[in-house]
Image: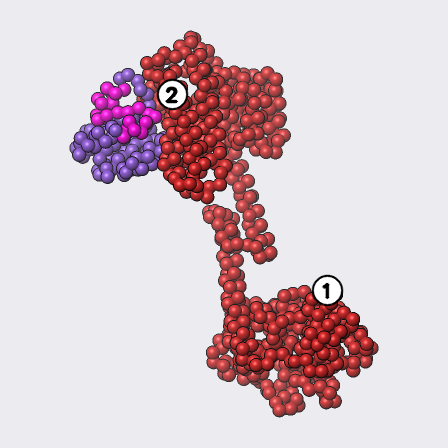
Chain colours: A red, B purple
């Protein structure tokens, strides 16, 4: 469509159309700016007001310029129109600057539609003047009734896009601009390749119409630059050329052009091809969006692992009406279930803390005062530790609270009676176990630091936990609530699962070995030193140690194969005692106790305490099965079963 | 307050004009083409109609004629809005049955004074 102007003056219809085309966006600018100004009250909005006033002043100035050139009674020629465009550029620039400044400011004091309205101002300003100074098309302006066929708004179903037209011919540019704008597209124009690349670098476009034959940087070169730039590569480019030769077309396609159009174009074909390209781009964008959302789901999964997932994070993906949306919904649902469980657990720990608090208040004398023994408060030990207090005495030795003077931290020191370590084989095995235990690092396990020997005394250093043992808790509270017991059970199952995974069996789970810090965090101690406990129980017969086998499973008492399930039995006894206030079996002597333990069935928990749920009672009873194979088989299974109870 | 039916196909025009009229206290209903405009107007309840003359489906000229032919809408004041201030548009609009007419882009104070004049006189 290569028409030329036949004269300098424009028809009244053409002028009326041009006036309308220019005044409509200005009117939008003014309308939105006035509304925003009405809303921009208060001290916070002072800066917004200034920018809006600049916008309004610029728009009114532009309106006056238009009226001066294109007033109804004026006759105007193309030179006048060119001058008008040139003159409008300045107020338009002020509008764009002010609107951009408004968008760039933090939106704390504005309501939700603020940004949307400022964007409307920007988009209206963009429609005001083409980037270049084109001459209005000499095409006859359609009459009012003709406009029905080509309404200003795009017909339904047609995509509206930001299109860059690159052509060195002013008339071609203008014809394309007007046609595309009628279809509802926002159009920018460039008169040479360099300008096109500048514009592409400065703002987003959905489509480029690119003339092949241009001076300096020709269409091929621009196309190559676009396709070689990762940020621009995905913008479809339709090449336009008067050349109708195969090699030229082939070259365009090879360089990544989306389509090719011959000049002069048929308007229907132009529209169809542009829509096809935009549709393809839309599908590609959709695909990219899909992949992006897949990544969001993957990120969310990672966030769950690290505990940073926030519920509802996948809301956008979950809103999709497809498989991915379903996956996101299921995922979010699962996470919220887990979270609900965690919340319940937290509640239980709170209950447990209250019980601990209560026990502290009830217990007049908590902890054992320093009362002699080998070491007393203030003593230096192993040249590195200062004894603070004696924490307890047991069959194997004494536990002290001490200060590690090198690391400036509190530790617990457990000294071991020399008779346990006189056997060299036993000592070696013990050291191996300590090595294993040192690998255990978990919030529910008391850390073992070191094993040492000093002046003939063997000792272990461990993490010092301020708190009380479950033994002490039970002694003051007689029995615990279901909620507190579940808090202990869950943490105990977790610590055993961790230890068992590392190949460490505790062998001596009992209330004395379960520490509770003031926050209700359970910490299992003495992992790795239980072999000594077994030794200790042998020594019992010699009368040296008074211990209780109440927590030992039959296979351990019978010196048969001990495995992870033995710890689960002991855990069962602990839980039984928590819920009922008593271990399942009691005897006045060790022998009578062992006899009962091997031959009698314990009374179900629920019979002794009807407040306990039948399910929890049954689970505890299953842990107490005499045959290991009849028990819950692993600590993780126990943890899982406890979760199901939650 | 008075209820105005705005018949306008351009989304930005519709958005802006309806909001500005609402701010002035009018209740505004909107139709996006002539056919919908006629249907809504016949449903009744409007004190005034702002009719864009270049509309898809049925244009504003035809819609106005239909509204003037129907007994339920014959008395509702209509202000026609045309894109071009061409000589003769005014006569054409009045001939089609508009009570008044204005040019687009709309200048709000001028349009408001026309609306108020019609509502004041017709009420």
Residue in the picture at 50% in, 16% down: A170
Q: Position of residue A593 (x, y in %)?
A: 63, 88
Q: Residue furthest top?
A: A7
Neighbour class for label 1 at 10 Å: few (<14), some, many (≥20)? few
Which residue is nearer to you in this view: B72 or A531?
Answer: A531
Which residue is nearer to you in this view: A452 or A343?
Answer: A452
Residue in the picture at 23% in, 29% down: B78
Say whether disc 2 or disc 1 marks the residue closer to the N-terminus: 2
Q: Position of residue A153 (x, y in %)?
A: 39, 29
| Residue at mark 2 | A64
B102 drawn magenta: yes
A184 drawn magenta: no
Q: Nearer the viewer, mark 2 or mark 1?
A: 1
- Bounds of the magenta segment: B89-112
Callout 1: chain: A
| Residue at mark 1 | A407
Tell me if residue A228 can be seen: yes
Residue in the picture at 19% in, 29% down: B69
Determine whether label 2 and label 1 are within 8 Å by CB.
Answer: no
Rendered image quadrant of residue A260: top right
Q: Position of residue A453 (x, y in %)?
A: 80, 74
Q: Is residue A86 positioned above or below A351 on the image?
A: above
Q: Are marks 2 and 1 on the same chain?
A: yes
Which residue is nearer to you in this view: A628 or B24?
Answer: B24
């Amino acid at each position: 469509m290569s028409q030329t102007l036949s004269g300098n003056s424009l028809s009244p219809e053409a002028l009326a159309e041009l006036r309308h085309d220019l005044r409509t966006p200005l009117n939008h600018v003014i309308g939105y700016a006035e509304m925003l100004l009405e809303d921009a009250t208060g001290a916070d909005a002072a800066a917004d007001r200034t920018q809006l006033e600049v916008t309004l002043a610029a728009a009114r100035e532009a309106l006056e310029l238009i009226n001066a050139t294109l007033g109804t009674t004026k006759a105007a020629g193309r030179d006048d129109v060119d001058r008008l465009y040139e003159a409008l550029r300045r107020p338009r620039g002020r509008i764009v600057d002010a609107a951009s400044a408004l968008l760039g400011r933090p939106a704390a004091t504005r309501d939700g539609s603020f940004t949307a309205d400022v964007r409307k101002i920007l988009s209206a300003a963009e429609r005001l003047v083409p980037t270049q100074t084109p001459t209005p098309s000499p095409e006859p302006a359609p009459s009012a009734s003709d406009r029905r066929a080509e309404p200003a708004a795009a017909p339904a179903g047609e995509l509206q896009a930001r299109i860059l037209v690159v052509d060195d011919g002013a008339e071609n540019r203008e014809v394309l601009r007007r046609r595309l704008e009628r279809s509802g597209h926002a159009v920018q124009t460039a008169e040479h390749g360099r300008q096109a690349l500048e514009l592409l670098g400065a703002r987003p476009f959905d489509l480029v119409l690119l003339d092949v034959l241009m001076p300096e940087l020709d269409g091929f070169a621009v196309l190559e630059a676009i396709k070689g730039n990762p940020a621009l590569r995905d913008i479809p480019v339709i090449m336009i050329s008067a050349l109708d030769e195969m090699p030229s077309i082939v070259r365009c396609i090879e360089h990544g052009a989306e389509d090719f159009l011959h000049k002069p174009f048929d308007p229907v074909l132009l529209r169809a091809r542009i829509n096809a390209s935009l549709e393809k781009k839309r599908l590609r964008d959709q695909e990219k969006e899909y992949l992006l959302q897949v990544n969001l789901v993957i990120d969310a999964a990672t966030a769950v692992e690290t505990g940073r997932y926030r519920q509802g994070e996948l809301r956008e993906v979950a809103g999709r009406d497809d498989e991915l949306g379903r996956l996101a919904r299921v995922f979010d649902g699962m996470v919220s279930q887990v979270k609900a469980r965690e919340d319940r657990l937290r509640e239980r720990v709170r209950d447990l803390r209250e019980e601990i608090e209560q026990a502290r208040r009830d217990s007049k004398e908590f902890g054992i005062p320093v009362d002699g023994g080998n070491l007393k408060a203030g003593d230096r030990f192993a040249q590195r530790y200062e004894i603070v207090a004696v924490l307890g005495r047991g069959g194997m030795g004494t536990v002290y609270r001490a200060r590690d003077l090198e690391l400036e931290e509190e530790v617990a020191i457990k000294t071991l009676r020399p008779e346990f370590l006189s056997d060299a084989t036993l000592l070696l095995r013990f050291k191996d176990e300590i090595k294993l235990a040192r690998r255990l690092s978990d919030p529910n396990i008391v850390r073992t630091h070191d094993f040492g020997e000093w002046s003939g005394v063997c000792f272990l250093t461990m993490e010092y936990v301020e708190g009380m043992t479950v033994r002490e808790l039970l002694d003051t509270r007689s029995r615990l609530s279901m909620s507190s017991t579940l808090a202990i059970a869950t943490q105990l199952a977790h610590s055993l699962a961790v230890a068992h995974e590392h190949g460490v069996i505790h062998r001596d789970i009992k209330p004395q070995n379960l520490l509770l810090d003031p926050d209700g965090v359970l910490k299992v101690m003495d992992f790795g030193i239980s072999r000594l406990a077994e030794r200790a129980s042998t020594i019992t017969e010699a009368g040296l140690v008074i211990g209780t086998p109440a927590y030992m499973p039959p296979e351990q008492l019978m010196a048969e194969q001990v495995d992870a399930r033995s710890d689960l039995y002991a855990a069962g006894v602990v839980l039984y005692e928590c819920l009922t206030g008593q271990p399942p079996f009691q005897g006045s002597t060790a022998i009578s106790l062992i006899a009962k333990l091997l031959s009698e069935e314990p009374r179900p928990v629920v019979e002794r305490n009807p407040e306990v749920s039948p399910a929890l009672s049954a689970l505890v009873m299953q842990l107490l099965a005499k045959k290991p194979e009849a028990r819950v088989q692993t600590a993780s299974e126990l943890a899982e079963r406890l979760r199901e109870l939650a | 307050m008075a209820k105005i039916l705005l018949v306008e196909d351009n989304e930005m025009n519709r958005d802006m004009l309806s909001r500005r009229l609402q701010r002035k206290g009018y209740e505004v209903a909107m139709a996006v083409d002539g056919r919908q405009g006629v249907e809504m107007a016949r449903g009744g309840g409007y004190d005034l109609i702002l009719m864009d003359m270049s509309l898809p489906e049925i244009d504003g000229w035809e819609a106005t004629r239909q509204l003037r032919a129907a007994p339920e809408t014959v008395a509702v004041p209509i202000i026609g809005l045309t894109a071009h201030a061409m000589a003769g548009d005014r006569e054409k609009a009045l001939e089609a049955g508009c009570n008044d007419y204005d040019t687009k882009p709309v200048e709000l104070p001028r349009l408001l004074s026309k609306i108020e004049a019609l509502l004041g006189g017709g009420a």
